[in-house]
Amino acid sequence: MAKSIIAKNVDSMPRNEWLALRRKGIGGSDCAAACGLSRWKSPLQLFVEKTSSVKIETDNERMEWGKRLEPIIRSTFVEKSGLAVVECPIMFAFKEYPYMIANVDGIVSEKDGSKSLLEIKTVGEFSAADWDDGLPLEYYLQIQHYLAVTDLKKAYCAVLIGGNKFSHQVVERDNETIDTITALEYNFWNNHVLKGIPPAVSDKDSELLNSLYPKSNSATAILPTEADEIINEYLEIKALEEELKKQKALAENKLKSILGDNEGGQSAAGYSVNWKSVNSNRLDTTRLKAEHPEIIEQYSIQATSRRFSITPPKSQTQNNQSR
């Protein structure tokens, strides 16, 4: 690990301090988002996490069980691979780019005395297909980020899928990918985080924007000139969406008319079409309001949300009405 430096021993560090330390750099799990290649997190969301006190991501039960299962998965890897592994409660940082940091799950001792990395993952059964052709992209980039920081040549990824399927695979160092990662992370950190310039908004940012701006004030903003182009794009897509909804409903209704009373059908090409009866219990809120309004009052809470809409200019509305 000649090119990396030991940033800090995090073995007994309180979690809030560890999170504060992680905000000072780009970790392996941040890599795909910083590069704009994550399916789950946008560069803008990562920017907010690194530059503000807004907490976007919280620990959940899945993450908790991932931590609890990590020692078991590590010991299973040792048993299956025959290689020795030691835990590594150290945060590493790249000497040349100290904002590139790494917390690894283990250091592997190879038969020839060299060292490799171990990355541990737990995923649900619904994500099993993501692993059919190797590592999902986000995890591949994470491991290449770690190899860049630690200057090692190889890593192992041990994964437990659905709580009962264990496997591990070798990930070799990919210098071309590392060069790309390094350049993209340099741009994200130096041209966005350090300068306080947010990356462009993306389709993944709906929840983030709702969190950042939960309530509206009474002011009316003067929008920039490019807003009209975006508005026209939005209205065109909305019109197309409504037309596609109609076409979808028509195709669905044609199939329903063919099925009639039948619960399902099989097409010549092998498609299964189902139109099943489903029973569900629903609360009759109309009757409840009429017969027990005090219960509605007792258990009602006020919720605030923001409704997005676009109103055409008055001149356009008047022209439409006059036609």
Image (cartoon, rainbow, N blue to C red):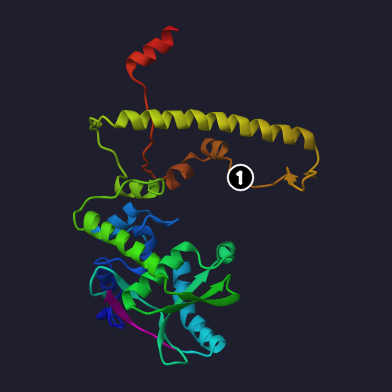
Q: Residue furthest top?
A: 322
Q: Nearer the viewer, residue 52 or 298?
A: 52
Residue 103 in the image: x percent, y percent?
34, 76
Q: Which residue is mark 1?
A: 282
Residue at image location 29% in from the left, 56% down from the top: 47
In this rendering, the answer to whether 115 lies above or below 198 is below
**Is 128 above or below relative to 306?**
below
Q: Tell me the quarter of the image containing the C terminus.
A: top left
Q: Quadrant of residue 286?
A: top right
Most prominent secondary structure in the magenta stretch? Answer: strand
Question: Residue flagged by tag 1: what amino acid is it?
Answer: Arg
Q: Is residue 88 magenta?
A: yes
Query: Does residue 52 appear in this view?
Result: no
Residue 212 lies in the magenta stretch: no
Quadrant holding the N terminus: bottom left
Question: Which quarter of the picture shows residue 6?
Answer: bottom left
What residue appears at the point 62 percent right and 30 percent down from the top-left corner? 247
Total number of numbered discs in the rendering: 1
Q: Which residues are magenta?
A: 85-93
* Quadrant of res 112: bottom left
Q: Secondary structure at mark 1?
A: loop
At 42% from the left edge and 10% from the top edge, which residue is drawn?
321
Q: What is the crowding at mark 1: few (fewer than 14 residues within 10 Å), some, or many (at least 20)?
A: few
Q: Which of 260/39 is in front?
A: 39
Residue 141, image x and y in percent?
A: 41, 66
- Residue 63, position as x, y percentages in the image: 44, 69
Give coordinates of residue 52: x percent, y percent. 24, 57
Q: Is residue 84 visible?
A: yes
Q: Give the vertical position of 310 relative to 24 (above or below).
A: above
Which residue is located at x 77 percent, y 45 percent?
Answer: 269
- Give left or right: position of 163 versus 12: right
